Image (cartoon, rainbow, N blue to C red):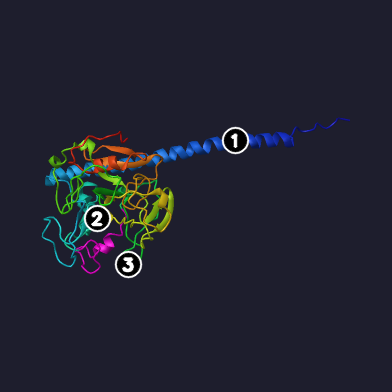
Amino acid sequence: MQCSKRQAAFTLIELLVVIAIIAILIGLLLPAVQKVREAAARTQCMNNLKQIGLALHNFHDTYNGFPPCRVENKNATTASTLFPLATYRHSWAPFLFPFIEQGNLQNLYNFHADCTSTTVINPSGLTNYQVSQIDVKLFLCPAAPGGRKESIGGPGGAVLAVTDYSPTSSVVTANNPYVTYVLPKDPVHLDGVLGQNILRPMSYVTDGTSNTMAIAEDAGRPQIWELGRQVGTFPPTPPGKRAAIGGWSQPCQIINLAGLNPALAGGTTPDFPGPCIVNCDNSLNPYGFHPGGANILMADGSVHLLNSSVSFNLVALLLVPNDGYVLPEQPF
């Protein structure tokens, strides 16, 4: 009579050891995967800005100046005579459509009706309000939250497509102790490389195109983010905050540096101006969902990660193209 052979099997202790090893490996792998995803998102975000930079230079070659940060006519019911290429109100974005392979979108948009007009029917059969609802992938950073739309109180509610990039156009200097340099101000055309109601030539950037930013990341709008935490959604503007305007067609989405006072963040007391300027809040300040900083496009077309530890003074000097100062610290 043959004895039956007993089949070998894992003991409970052996199974627990295997499970523990697998758990350790997963724990080691997940941060690496997250870092790869973050690096890929940051690279794509930088590539977006490089394409925008190329478009700015192609526009400059065509019109002998950079596009306006906005065309702003305070009375939007009357055509403005301040700017030859458009009337009423418009952001910088539609001027770049032919140079970012969005010619079809440009054909839908009407530069001689207000940017979000709901009444003027364009030759395409659409209003600018309807055209403004079309997402432009190049304007969206993959690291930022998806599915965002903005409302201006028009039909459909939150339907306007947004941008995560905006022209760096002005600095809040009044009652702001965090800017200690005397900066040239242009209340008519604003302070950045891209001016209001004007095509500024390259020669205007006397500080050097490699020392002056033109566009900065201001991601996450119309969600309002402070120090890595969402504190609201625009509209409305929460008490003590600035509006996180982000529609690509909206003229007021330009960056106006004010900074954040971290000691007042999260409350209802006005938390601006403040010393914290990068990745502090996305209400018209540089803000990115990248560890260590936010991406910026320089006037020469190069793209860099602006360090989140830099001073307000430095970012103000990077914004103004003709301040005459030497940068006091390394921004990248």
Q: Earlier in the sequence, mark 2 or mark 1?
A: 1
Q: Can you identify the residue that label 2 sits on?
A: 105
In this rendering, which labeled residue sits more in front, label 2 or label 1? 1
Q: CA distance from mark 3 to mark 2?
A: 23 Å
The secondary structure that dominates the magenta segment is loop
Residue on which disc 3 sits: 153
Numbered disc in front, either 1 or 3:
3
Report whether 79 appears left or right of 153. left
Q: Quadrant of residue 128?
A: bottom left
Q: Position of residue 222 (x, y in %)?
A: 36, 56
Residue 147 versus residue 283: which sits nearer the camera?
283
Q: Quadrant of the C terminus?
A: top left
Percent from the top left, x then y, of residue 273?
Answer: 32, 51
Asked whether the beta carbons under mark 2 and mark 1 sit within 8 Å of each other, the answer is no
Q: Is residue 130 magenta?
A: yes
Residue underneath mark 1? 24
